[in-house]
Each structure stands twice: as C-alpha cells, then as structure tokens.
C-alpha cells in the first residue's frame, strides 16, 4: 500500500466516523462547474418558470394579468430565490467555521432567533416597515449565532453530532420563549406564518 492510498483511506475513515471534511480532501473534489451543478441550475430554472405561470389568478386570461405578473409574481419569485441562496450560503459558512457537515441555520437556532427578533421589533414598534423588521431579524439572528458559537467553545465536542444537537436545543429554548411571548401578545398566528416562511407580503 502506497502512502497516497493510506492517506486516502485515513481521510475516508475520519469522514465516516466524525462527519468532518479532512483538510487534504479539497484537492480530490469534483470540478466546480460539473454536470451536477449544471443539472441543478437547469432544474431550478424549470421550477422558476413553472412557479411563475402557476397560481390562483390566471395571468393570461384575466383582467390585469400582465400587471399582476409583473407586480406580484416576479418580485416574489426573486425574493424566494435570494432567500434560498442566502440560507445555502449561511449553511456553507457555518460548515466551514465548525468543520461539520451537519451544521446549518436550522440546526443552530439561527432561524428561531430571527423569528424572535422579528416579533420583538413588531411588539416594540408596531408600525415598523418591512426593512425595519428585516433589520431586527438580522440583528437577532447574528446575536443568536454568536451565542451558539460561545456554547460550542464551552462544550466538549467528542462527536460531530454534538454540534447540531447543541444548536437544536438552543433553538428549542428560543422557540419556546417566542411562543410564550406570542401567546401573551396575541401574535401566535403571525409567529406561525413567519416560521412557515410566508412571502405573501411581497
């Protein structure tokens, strides 16, 4: 067995055991613009076209269909794509920082912190604009991410599964606090809509 084969087997064993990506494995990755990426882009483009042409209101036969298409469906679809891309980039950055493939915004409590920040912004300033609500959610999500990393520094990471478990537990606590505040302020329905990822206001 050559040294290269031994190193490759050692990297595969470490990846299977811990879920972490070895440092030397970057050179063995597939090209950036390969067939999987191109097929993924094509699939997303097809889904975007279908979503733009599908809805309760007939944009071709109804009155003002073209205006409805330009004002509502195109901005909403663009917002959905940007939100999905932002979530993917956040997950990638978190995985690089923690060297753990199980880490993403939904397993670190980031989404729960964002919902809490959005709700507190609406409670404190009911007439806040969409931009102000977004800023409140972003600030709360940033604070929640910092809290998550502080917890990681104080926890013994004997397994890669400990990292997402810590995030899920933290998110559950924050979600419980958000639910309690929402019940007290009669905003439980709004909180459910926010966590469901509704884009109806766009």
Image (spheres, rainbow, N blue to C red):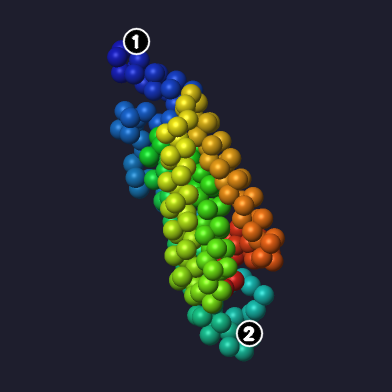
- Label 2: which residue? 61
Q: Position of residue 179 (x, y in %)?
A: 66, 55
Considering depth in this image, is 192 or 15 the residue closer to the camera? Answer: 192
Q: In this view, does 97 lie to the left or right of 188?
A: left
Place of residue 31 in the rendered image (x, y in percent of width and height, measured from the top left): 34, 41
Within-10-Å neighbours for mark 1: few <14, some 14–19, many 20+ = few
x, y percent for residue 172: 61, 45
Q: Residue at x 56, y 58 (%)?
A: 115
In this rendering, is residue 171 above or below 153?
Answer: below
Instruction: Identify the element where label 1 is drawn.
Output: loop
- For marks 2 and 1, give the CA distance: 70 Å
User: Which of these two is toward me, 37 or 190?
Assistant: 190
The answer to whether residue 42 shows anywhere in this view is: no
The numbered mark at residue 123 is none
Crowding at label 2, few (<14), some or many (≥20) Cα neighbours within 10 Å? few
Residue sitting nearer the eye, 34 or 145: 145
- Residue at the image position 56 percent from the left and 82 percent from the top: 68
Quarter of the image containing the N terminus? top left
Specify the label residue 1 is tagged with.
Answer: 1
């Amino acid at each position: 067995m050559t040294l290269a084969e031994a190193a490759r087997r050692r990297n595969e064993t470490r990846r299977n055991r811990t879920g972490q990506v070895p440092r030397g494995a970057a050179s063995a990755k597939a090209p950036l613009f390969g067939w999987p990426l191109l097929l993924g882009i094509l699939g997303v483009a097809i889904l975007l076209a279908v979503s733009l042409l599908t809805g309760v209101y007939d944009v071709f036969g109804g009155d003002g269909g073209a205006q409805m298409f330009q004002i509502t469906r195109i901005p909403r679809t663009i917002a959905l794509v940007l939100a999905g891309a932002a979530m993917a980039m956040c997950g990638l950055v978190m995985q690089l920082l923690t060297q753990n493939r199980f880490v993403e915004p939904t397993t670190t409590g980031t989404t729960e912190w964002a919902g809490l920040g959005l709700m507190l912004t609406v409670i404190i300033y009911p007439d806040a604009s969409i931009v102000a609500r977004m800023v409140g959610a972003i600030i709360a999500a940033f604070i929640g991410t910092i809290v998550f990393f502080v917890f990681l520094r104080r926890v013994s990471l004997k397994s890669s599964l400990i990292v997402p478990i810590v995030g899920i537990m933290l998110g559950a606590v924050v979600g419980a606090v958000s639910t309690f505040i929402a019940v007290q302020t009669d905003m439980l329905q709004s909180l459910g809509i926010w966590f469901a990822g509704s884009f109806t206001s766009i």
